[in-house]
Amino acid sequence: MFCHRLLLACLVLFITAFASAQQPLNTDWPNYGNDPGGMRFSSLSQINRENVSKLAVAWIVHTGDVSDGSHDRRRSGFEATPIFVDGTLFFSTGFNRVIALDPESGKQKWAYDPKIDLTLEYGDGLINRGVSTWLDDKSSSGQPCQRRIYEATLDARLISVDAATGKPCLDFGEYGQINLRDVPGYRAGWYHMTSPPAIIDNLVIVGSAIDDNGRAAMPSGVVRAFDVRTGVQRWSWDPIPLTETTTDGKKERQIGAANAWSVMAVDQQRDLVFVPTGSASPDYFGGLRPGDNKWADSIVALRAKTGELVWGFQLVHHDLWDYDSAAPPLLTTLQHDGKSAPVVVQGNKAGFVFVLDRDTGKPVFPIEERPVPKSDVPGEAASPTQPFPLAPPPLVPQHASVDDAWGPTPSDREYCRKVFGSLRNEGIYTPPSLQGSLDVPGNLGGMTWSGYAFDPQHSLLITNTNNLFAKIKLIPRRDFWRVEARTEKGEYTEQAGTPYGLFRRFIQSPSDLPCNAPPWGSLIAVDLNEGKIRWKVALGSMQDFGKKQPPIPPGSLTLGGPIVTASGLVFIGGTFDPYLRAFDVQTGNELWKGKLPNSGHATPMTFMKNGKQYVVIAAGGHDKISEEQPSDELVAFTLP
């Protein structure tokens, strides 16, 4: 009897293993976040804990699209995440060129150039984070534009090209493109696109990036859906009500932005598009936009077929800190209270993770409205409360005292103590003030556009965070242009149409390093079934940032997100030091790092071709980090 039971058990194990082995792997990476819900999880496991240390460069491609900020151009960055379908890699450059590569050699198949104006003052610099694709199942194989590649450009166009040839799909709009500039308050450069469109129900859906701290009357943050074949607009949705004022006989918006500049997620089964929105204009003074400003700083679910608002949840009321919902939403299913729970996960720059029911928007973990500091700026009425999730806990510090000031030398620390002590400081949501306020965290997060990945095997959300403090100060309009009001180095923004200009900067000591203690960037694993942090490690290094520094602890500001594979690996670049790293998803142990030709401020991706797994990342530096030289390399790693 024992032998029969043993034989039966072995037979069951064999059949299970055989069946598992016969299931086809998803070797592609067809969306920015791999699946339409943006989990950034790959079922590939050829590269694993045991052999990841052997990863080596397979190829490096130079796009040629790089600008150092001279010749009347903005600086460029290279933040694109390629997609992989039909045996080809597709990606965009900071100049909005779309390029198709052979995935094994890196050899270019074609390139399409929409010829954008490189001299315009795009607020995000010369960057684009990727393209999207759609397969026409009604078109026969070999027909032009059976598979299409879509890109939203910096100069506000939506482009459709044939994936096979790179030629424009002439049935889409006018000669393969449509104009996205017909929005209230449009101005070239202020209104642009940096993220890949969303695709669902034969619709291509786009938001926009808006320079939202320059003035009160900014363009509309409208989200629009277009027919994937013809480019005909099907619907539009505006996150905030239209408020108009008369100026010289002309009507213009008194409040704008609240735009969806990050990546959207879609749920085909539920016919839902999940849209993360940013702050209303201007960012740091809300006297002309009283109330909560819904649906700015929110995650909203729209009916894909109609654009109708199904539900919305506001993460920040009456934003005065530029705490955008910058990270893409992530769709997954959890086990909560003994039940299977389809959820949308939305993090923000404040460092909070909101876990919401996908159908209703109701919190899965409790969220409470807590009193927050009042504004003392004439004409401003800050929200009396803000939403605080009870789980998971905040992923970054949200309070600081003078004793928390840090520096690599005693003189640096003393300088930082004096700066902290001079500022209004009541913890997170301390409003901007005329004396200057300590912003903890600053507007680089928390979680920014880098976003997060989800490991469904362990229910772990993997995210990188920034821990940088900032000073924000409002300057009365009568003083804003005076020399004596501009004695500090930093960013001065007019906030035209309001009583106050803005000064902001990340607080650095004379060493150029941040005034708060490292790590300035971390990689964190959150158990979303239980709402608990499982592990947290410093990510990267800022050694010799700005100048030669004494030895400093690890942890770098991070711009570029993680992916997870079925073999239990987390891949991430994003740091000041130029490496792509691999971590153990269960422990946070760093298993490997591969040298990049430049900092990789992009999210990597992985795919398999002819039985070989590759990991690819853009390594082009960052357009706003002056210590980094912009570059143009796309780098692929594989096992020897």
Image (spheres, helix red, strand yellow):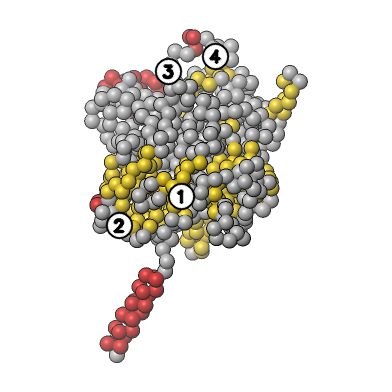
Residue depicted at x 46% and y 38%: 93
Cα separation between marks 4 and 2: 56 Å
The residue carrying mark 2 is: 48
- Return the disc, 1 or 2, that comes first in the chain's sequence: 2
The amino acid on which the numbered mark 4 sits, given as a three-letter code, is Phe
Quadrant containing the N terminus in the rendered view:
bottom left
* Vertical comparison of 372 with 43: above or below: above
The residue carrying mark 3 is: 489
Outermost residue on the bottom side: it is 1
Where residue 249 appears, x then y in whole percent?
A: 76, 20
Q: Mark 4, mark 2: which one is toward the viewer?
A: 2
Q: Mark 1, mark 2: which one is toward the viewer?
A: 1
The residue carrying mark 1 is: 83
- Return the disc, 4 or 3, that comes first in the chain's sequence: 4
Asked which secondary structure carries label 3, the reply is loop
Q: Is residue 236 visible?
A: yes
